[in-house]
Image: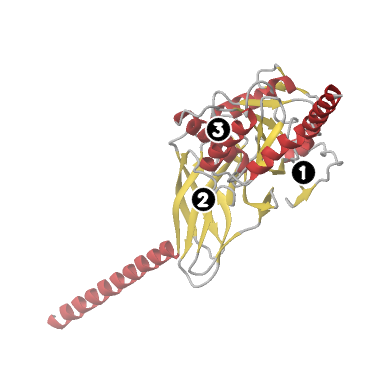
Amino acid sequence: MLNNIKIALFTLTALASTTAAIAQNHVHQQNDDQHQITIIDPWIRSAPANAPALGLFLKISNNTNQEVRLVSVHTPGYKRIELHRTINNNGMMKMVKQDFMPIPAQGKLHLKPGSWHVMLIGPNRVPGKGEKIELSLEFNNGNTQTIQALVRKGKRMMKHHSAH
Amino acid sequence: MNIKILTAIGALLLLITVAFYPLDGAKNYKSLSAQLATAQIMHNPDKPLSDFSLSDHNGHVFSNNNLKDNWTLLLFIYTHCPDICPTELANMSMLKAQLENTQAEVVPNVVAVTFDPLRDTPKVLKTYVTHFDKGFVGVSGDPQQIDQLVKDFGAYYERVIYDENGKQITLNKKESLPEDAIEKGYVINHTARIYLVSPDGEVLAGFPTSHNLSNMANDIEKLVKAFEE
């Protein structure tokens, strides 16, 4: 009888330990996924009520040892969403559609006005200043990040230069 | 005899003055160039703007006369632009506020002419442009006249459409848009210079990208002063 109780207790303890270990491992895995790619300061430029397209900007930090690619962005209420890069070619500002956005290993990609940006085309309703829009970002490593982008006024396109 | 000599000298001086007056004016701007942080002098009396008659965002005629008797910052935009054009309009709003706050002698009017009159009607421009500043003026109208104005200002644009696979195709200037272009969407590659038009209704200077507002404000002050001298 005593032996049976000992066996039962041992089995329960072993089971509990295993479950805890699995759960802990799962938590680690989730944390690792979240920390692989970090999204900083996502924002949408506040736009006129009839704006046909909006710009989404953010910083993406890739904390892995491999290049990661942003392949798509999703949020309801838009006709389509495209990845774009503005390129200044001798004063000609070219809007170049991108299949993906590369974030180098242990590096960052800054989506900002006049550079890389996400184009939100054909909004059902243009969001107002101060609103937060939920979007999901899909990466080629299977990672998906859900973000809340604040609608706010744009910053200046370029930083200050010292006067010469 | 003396009278003849004096008359000859007087005539010669008058001739020299008349002959060199325009050059002297141009030289002033030339010497100003070195003092400008960002602006490039575009003043060219030999190439005045063509006559144009377009429409402002309230449906009123907007012609050469609207550029006269006041200072204007003119830029070309299109409302389907998600990046550069709203950035420039927001920058112009901040520049205007900066000039007002520093009690600058001149706060130019801001006029935004569309590259894309097909989609940017005066009504569309009114909602769009006045979002950035109630005083901004949007201008649309006849595509050929807009093209001429774009050329006169030394600006440039090209339309980019999408094929069935979503790949971008750049149209050359002579190619017209396909019938389904509005439905499928198109973007415009374009120059993004901002122009300072003086009260004689002619282009005085251009500000190439990128636009540093403090430098622009300082340069505008110098250009106004040089024009008024």
Looking at the rendered image, the quarter that the N terminus of chain A falls into is bottom left
Q: Is residue A50 visible?
A: yes
The subunit letter for the residue under badge 1 reads B
Q: Secondary structure at mark 2?
A: loop
Categorize mark 3 by other alpha carbons within 10 Å: few (<14), some (14-19), many (20+).
few
Seen in the picture, residue B162 relative to A102 is either above or below; the reply is above
Taking the image as shown, residue A113 lies to the left or right of residue A35, namely: right
Q: Position of residue B164 (x, y in %)?
A: 77, 49
Between label 2 and label 1, give the one nearer the viewer: 2
Between label 3 and label 2, give the one nearer the viewer: 2
Please tell me which of labels 3 and 2 falls first in the chain.
3
Q: Which residue is mark 3?
A: A125
Q: Position of residue B43 (x, y in %)?
A: 72, 36
Taking the image as shown, residue B140 lies to the left or right of residue A101, namely: right
- What's the CA distance linking mark 2 and mark 1? 30 Å
- What's the CA distance linking mark 3 and mark 2? 37 Å
Of the pair B184 and A43, the residue shown nearer to us: A43
Occupied quadrant, residue B143? top right
Taking the image as shown, residue B127 lies to the left or right of residue B176, namely: left
Q: Secondary structure at mark 1?
A: strand
Proximity of marks 2 and 1: CB atoms separated by less than 8 Å:
no
Proximity of marks 1 and 3: CB atoms separated by less than 8 Å:
no
Q: Amino acid at mark 1?
A: Glu
Q: Position of residue A109 (x, y in %)?
A: 53, 59
Residue B158: mark: 1
The subunit letter for the residue under badge 3 reads A
- In this rendering, do the residues under marks 3 and 2 share a single chain? yes
Q: Which residue is mark 2?
A: A161
The subunit letter for the residue under badge 2 reads A
